[in-house]
Amino acid sequence: MKAAQLHSLADIEIVDTPVPEIGEHEALVRMRACGICGSDTMEWYVKKKAPFFLGHEPAGVIEKVGRNVTQFKQGDRVFVHHHAPCFDCKFCRKKQYALCAAWKATNLAPGGMAEFFRVPEINLNGDMLLLPESFSFEDGSLIEPVACVVKSMRKANLQPQDSLLVIGLGVMGQMHVLLARHAGVHQIIGADRVPYRLNKAREFGANMVVDVTREELPEAVRQATDGDLADVVIVGPGTTSAMATAMKCVGKGGTVLFFTPAPDGELLSIHPFHLYFNEINLLFSYSCGPDDTRGAMALIEQGIINAEKLVTHRYPLEKIREAVDNTIKAGESLKTLVVCQS
């Protein structure tokens, strides 16, 4: 079978590899759609893991199941989370699933960006979901990224009366805008440097957008909020410069949530005096868990977020190089998928 393997961002190839054998508690899934995540295009992030097989946002059809699998069957249309928790450790008991040792150790084999992949027992039992009849496979491939936003929005604890600033309007930023509008947040401000993304944010419900190549973001937010600054700031870019800017945009009693990591070793200077006396909350949101994937599936089923709104580019598996390049260049694109028709 064919699978996409990354050696570096400049060296991604389609390789021939055996179709995985499955155990009696496992499943084999034929991939039908798989998203390219922003983390797949962060050079520092992929460098420490390479070489590896790409793909952790897959949806597909079960090709076969092990003889002791009873809750799924051949032909079922499924979403599969690449990580799954143990549900028993101290982190799982607090629903901090991304900190679970089992969660970090689990994965699909070889990866979701392959014609077929093996679903281990822990993933099958912990976070493999049947797709509703109304879902396309493209909708199913959005469950994992939407779930990451469901988690971050929950942690940020946005209220309808809040003002929200979303820094970075790639596909994840657009999802934050869509969910904030659905939650009835009264003021949503989006910030980016790409006109296409700024226009999309307006279309998806932002009250105001700021082109950071033309305006100073803190001052623009100050004017838009009558001097109060934002109640909640979601920081999409994994850069310390964006993070530092975010802390200049948050108002008293507000929250800054970091959605993407900066490279290991980079340091961010903070002003404890200012943070303390203004009671600023700094939060971090890493990935998602089983509760979030189910919440994401419900939102997609309601049409609040779906592939029709967010998927702009589709490539066959053989053109994985072009698909990754399109994600890196961004421009007039949001979500890029690899799709297999059969």
Image: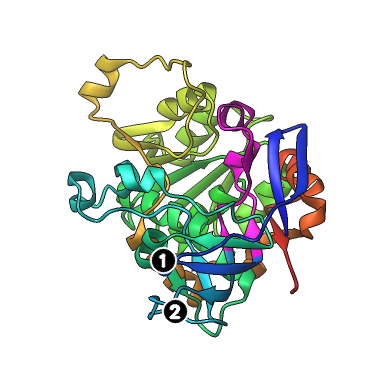
Q: Which residue, given by chain and number where applicable, does mark 1 sit on?
A: 124
Q: Nearer the viewer, residue 18 or 112?
A: 18
Q: Residue type at mark 1?
A: Leu
Q: Nearer the viewer, residue 336 or 76?
A: 76
Name the amino acid type tagged 2.
Phe
Q: What residue sits 31% from the left and 48% below the top?
A: 155
The label shown at residue 72 is 2
Stretch of the chain drawn in magenta: 33-58
Q: Residues within 10 Å of mark 1 (few under 14, many from 20)?
A: many
Give residue 81's position: percent from left, percent from top: 46, 59
In percent of width and height, residue 147 lies at: 44, 58
Residue pictured at 48% horizontal, 82% vertical: 73
List x then y, in percent, for residue 15: 76, 48
Left or right: 222, with 324 as reference point: left
Report the side of 35 relative to 318 (left or right): left
Q: Is residue 62 above or below residue 290?
A: below
Magenta residue check for 50 = yes
Estimate how packed mark 2 is, as few (under 14), some (14 to 19) or many (20 or more) residues with alpha carbons within 10 Å: many
Q: Secondary structure at mark 1?
A: helix
Nearer to the camera, 291 or 9: 9
Verify CB contact (< 8 Å) between mark 2 and mark 1.
yes
Identify the mark nearer the N-term, 2 or 1: 2
Q: Secondary structure at mark 2?
A: loop
Q: Quadrant of residue 33?
A: bottom right
Q: Position of residue 308 (x, y in %)?
A: 66, 70
Indicate which disc residue 231 carries.
none
Is residue 186 in sight in this rendering? no
Residue 149 vertical placement versus 278 (above, below):
below
227 with respect to 168 (left or right): left
